[in-house]
Amino acid sequence: MTRLLWLDYRAALRERKTWIAAAMLVYAVLVIPLLLADPPPHVREAIAAWFADADTFAVFMFVWIDLVMNKVVTFVPVILASGVVLRERDTGVLALLAAKPLTLSRYFVVRTVSTCAVMLTLYVGAQLLAALWCPGRVAGFRPGTFLAAMSLHAFAALFATAFAATVIVAVGRRGRAR
């Protein structure tokens, strides 16, 4: 079982959708500090209205958590989980797998855990890249505080991935039954 999980994880890391998700995260890491370095006047006014002291690190954390990570964690898990079991069903391999000693429910769990591991790899990689990239670009950047806050959001990324995989499989089965 562990071998299958490892092989599926490695295969998922090589998929095009994983590389696209990684590129989106790297783009966010590289661009957000540059955008916040010299925001347009209307954005400065909004920052002044929301944050009384306009602490650069607080503004960065707000933008990073709310506008970047929450949005990414909303749709990247759906993209990553889109192939869980459905690809096997469409190619006819699922019927072959059903004849093996590995139950379909266990296979689904392996695929879901593998997808969660891929999401966690992308998420942690993006946070570590940001922790290395941002100290020179964001005034007052505190890597410890940043990584502590981001570690809490890792659970949201894992939950969103597992939930997306479950919903995709449930909807796929329901669609096939019609």
Image (cartoon, grey):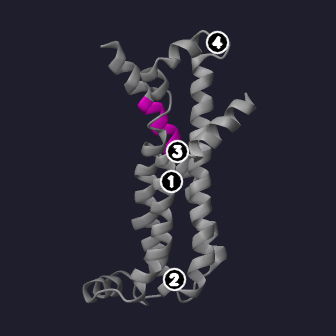
- Residue wearing tag 4: 100
- Residue wearing tag 3: 15
Q: How many marks?
A: 4
Q: Tell which of 108 and 23 is nearer to you.
A: 23
- Residue wearing tag 1: 19
Tell whether label 4 touches label 3 (CB within 8 Å). Answer: no
Q: CA distance from mark 4 to mark 2?
A: 54 Å
Q: Earlier in the sequence, mark 4 or mark 1?
A: 1
Q: Which residues are magenta?
A: 160-168
Furthest residue in direction top, as rendered:
99
Q: Residue at x 44, y 76 (%)?
A: 32
Compared with residue 151, is residue 79 higher up or lower down, i.e. above or below? above
Q: Residue at x 59, y 66 (%)?
A: 127
Q: Earlier in the sequence, mark 3 or mark 4?
A: 3
Tell whether label 1 touches label 3 (CB within 8 Å). Answer: yes
The residue under label 2 is which amino acid type? Phe
Q: CA distance from mark 1 to mark 2?
A: 29 Å
